[in-house]
Amino acid sequence: MNKENFLTRGIVVCLLAFVCCFLWGSAFPCVKIGYRISDISSDDTVSQILYAGMRFTLAGIMVIVYSSIANKKFISPKGKNESLQVMKLSFFQTIMQYFFFYIGLANTSGVKSSIIIGSNVFVSIVVSSLIFRLEKITLNKALGCIIGFAGILVINLSGGNLGTGLKLTGEGFIFISTFSYAFSSVLMKKYSKTTNPVMLSGWQFLFGGIVMTAFGLASGGEVQINSPSSVAMIGYLAFISAAAYTLWATLLKYNPVSKVSVYGFMNPVIGVILSNVLLKEDKQPSLVTAIIALALVCVGIYVVNREKK
């Protein structure tokens, strides 16, 4: 069985996607813990950007070193075309997505963030279908998007009304991050047809990480990485990015966007569980509310994927 046939098998896609989603789900509480042990306050925007830049620079180095060793040669963009692909991908996947993600996460709960990020499943399908025309949007996909988005509204409006339930620099920034991720997923699908997705993954992280680090330092950001726990946390967060995104990019190369992104429902499930266990935040959505929201997201996933039985 060749690599393409192996990576398009349903059970293989499901298992590998679960690994990715478990790692990403664990990032929600771990980023907030990382802020705490590195002395970064929720309103210190430039330090958050600096922290993100350090994480992704390290992630890029991890991917490039590992891939170069595995291929017994140094991997890097070849020519102007691949360099432009790296920069475009990096803008959406790393710079724009995580600029808004890190700030948004600091201004809302880990549970709510994980549920909102779950909407990237539906946004990715819409972007792939309506903007890039890589696949057709069907009635099932449209209905699934509506049902899934209903789950997002349930978890965000649980505070009682729109004024107290939503915050631009919190939930709003997480939504913007989600749209940026959707564009990056479709771009990765498009570029990986002719370019090595692992190379794209490593170099877009490195480029984006350096840009964010430079901006954070120039703006006066400060991050304290001076204890074993702070070193371990930023190392783990870098590993999450390096391993999960590279694996996800490989799945996107060999499968339709909708087939891969549909498994993203596991992100909010894992994020909810780990946020409740590790963070114990105040004013969390009730268990019943979270279950209803997750149920709606999962029903939306099922409706989107039903025609692919």
Image (cartoon, rainbow, N blue to C red):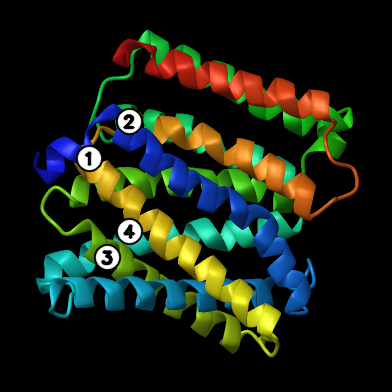
Image coords of residue 261 (percent x, y): 40, 35
Q: In the image, which is nearer the foreground, mark 2 or mark 4?
A: 2
Query: To which residue does mark 1 refer?
Result: 7
* Quarter holding residue 40: bottom right
Q: Quadrant of the C terminus?
A: top left
Which of label 2 and label 3 is nearer to you?
2
Vertical position of residue 193 compared to residue 158: above or below: below
Residue type for callout 3: Val
**Circle 4 is placed at which residue position?**
89
Mark 3–mark 1 distance (CA, rounded to whole Å): 24 Å
Q: Amino acid at mark 1?
A: Leu
Q: Residue at x 28, y 43 (%)?
A: 251
Residue at image position (62%, 48%) is 174
Describe the element under mark 1 as helix, strand or loop.
helix
3 vs 1, front mark? 1
Q: Are marks 4 and 3 in contact (CB under 8 Å)?
A: yes
Q: Earlier in the sequence, mark 2 or mark 3?
A: 2
In this view, the residue in front, 1 or 250, is 1
**Mark 3 or mark 1: which comes first in sequence?**
1
